[in-house]
Structure formats: C-alpha cells, structure tokens
Amino acid sequence: MRIVVTNCNTTQEMTEEIVRGARAAAGPGTTVTALTPAWGPESAEGWLDSYLSAAAVLDTLRTYDEPYDAVVMAGFGEHGREGARELVDVPVVDITEAAAHFACLLGRRYGVVTTLERSCGQIEDSLETAGVGRNCAAVVGTGLGVLDLGDESRTEEAFVAAAERARDAGAEVLVLGCAGMTGLQRTVGEKLGLPVVDGVSAAVKLAESLVTLGLTTSRAGSYAKPLPKRRTWGPPPGEAPPPR
C-alpha cells in the first residue's frame, strides 16, 4: 500500500517530522511518501495562508505522477480537503477530521490544542464542516507559532498549559492541533492522564483501513469529478511567477 502525505507548507524540516510520525504509524507493507509544496507559505497560520496552502497542495497532487493508494493531508484545520477529494481517485484523509473521529471513540468530548489563537476559529469551522464539531469542548492555542515548535521543551510546556485549559472546559480526550506537534502524545498524555490523539497517525491508520476495505470517495453529488473546462494553475513550468 502506498500513502502520500502532503505537508501544508513549504518548510522541508516540518515535512520530515511529519513523515517520521506517519511511517511510525504505518503498518507492515505500507510505504509513506511525503510531498512538500513547491510554493505557498512557509507556515500556515490564518485564513490567507490556509487558502494559499490549499491551492499549493492541490497543485502538488495534480502534478505528482507516481502511483499511490491514498492521500493524507497533514494540515490541521487547513482548507483543501474537499477539493482534493474531487481531484484524485483514491481516499483522501485530513488529519483534522481523522483525529476528531478517533477522539470521539475515546471520550464524549474532546479538546484541540493548537498553535496561535488566530487559528482556533478556522479549526472550529473545519470540525463543523466535517460533522465532528458538536463533540469539541474547546480549541485552545498555545501561543506558539508553527515554526516555534522545534523547541521541544518550550512546546511541551505550552501544550500542557493549554491542555489543562481544554480539560477544564470539559475535554476528556486531547487532540494535537498541528502536524508539527507529532510525537507529543507520548509524553503529554502521561502528564495529563488523558488520551492524546495525533492527527497524522490517526489519518494514516484510517487511510490504510479505507484502502484495505476497498473504499474510496463517492462520486454521487458533492465530490463528483470536476467539470471539464480550461483551468489555469499558474506560470508554465520553468517560467518565473510575477513579482509580488
């Protein structure tokens, strides 16, 4: 089985961290390939970044010509999953909804701990669109930017403080609200005494299950194939984009 994991930003170091977590979760016989968009934001934090990221990820999938069996979209709360489901003919699993579905199996209400507060509303909207918002007790920011997550001790301290707020709001399960937090679940869960779900791992296992069961995206209605028409995706290959 071949799973493609798409980073939502252009930071290669984060792609490498994401793929390490994805490969650790993958079962025997599953290969994981990570894709980093060639353009877009270096970190996705806010609506503008998210829409740019969505277009960049879709463009990356559109131009990737190796065979694969499923896509995992590793941007928490970022846009693009619905477009990807129209675009490709294999299952597409978004880490946001994957983590929430897993959390709903472990407790009545879950809480999401993410990066900056500005991302909280966007994540709430994504959870609502996916149909798993009603079980979310809180989405809490750590105050750290995506590119700050490389400082492990600082990230862990900020995560624990934010997670305590989510627990106080009624969360019985915690969700890592950024792909760059992959790996924290092993240490933070013990400190808080709550299950902690990593979206990358959850999405990989769901993708494997869908492929094993022979299931893929329905083409009846919402995710029908895009209408045939001329679409301009950007400058031709080899041609520089216009100045900003």
Image (cartoon, rainbow, N blue to C red):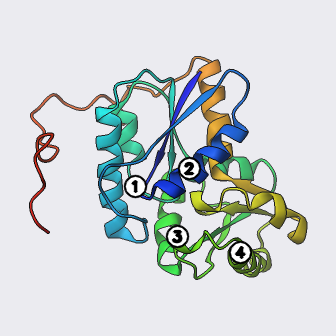
Q: Which numbered dot is residue 16?
A: 2
> Label 1 belongs to which residue?
79
The answer to whether any part of residue 108 appears in the image is: no
Q: Secondary structure at mark 3?
A: helix
Residue 142 found in image quarter? bottom right
Query: Left or right: where does residue 45 sit relative to residue 99?
Result: left
Q: CA distance from mark 4 to mark 1?
A: 24 Å
Of circles 3 and 1, the one toward us is 3
Give the amino acid type for the residue marked by disc 3 in the picture. Val
Q: Is residue 236 above or below residue 158?
A: above
Q: Secondary structure at mark 1?
A: loop
Give the amino acid type for the residue marked by disc 4 in the picture. Phe
Q: CA distance from mark 3 to mark 4?
A: 13 Å
174 and 10: which is toward the camera: 10
Of circles 3 and 4, the one toward us is 3
Of circles 2 and 4, the one toward us is 2
Residue 88 found in image quarter? top left
Point out the image quarter for the N terminus.
top right
> Label 3 belongs to which residue?
146
Tags 1 and 2 touching, CB below 8 Å: no
Query: Nearer the N terminus, badge 3 or badge 2?
Result: 2
Give the amino acid type for the residue marked by disc 1 in the picture. His
- Tell me residue 238's x, y (percent): 14, 42
Give the amino acid type for the residue marked by disc 2 in the picture. Glu
Q: CA distance from mark 2 to mark 4?
A: 21 Å
- Tell me residue 236's x, y (percent): 11, 41
Q: Mark 2: give few (<14), some (14-19) or many (20+) Cα within 10 Å.
A: some
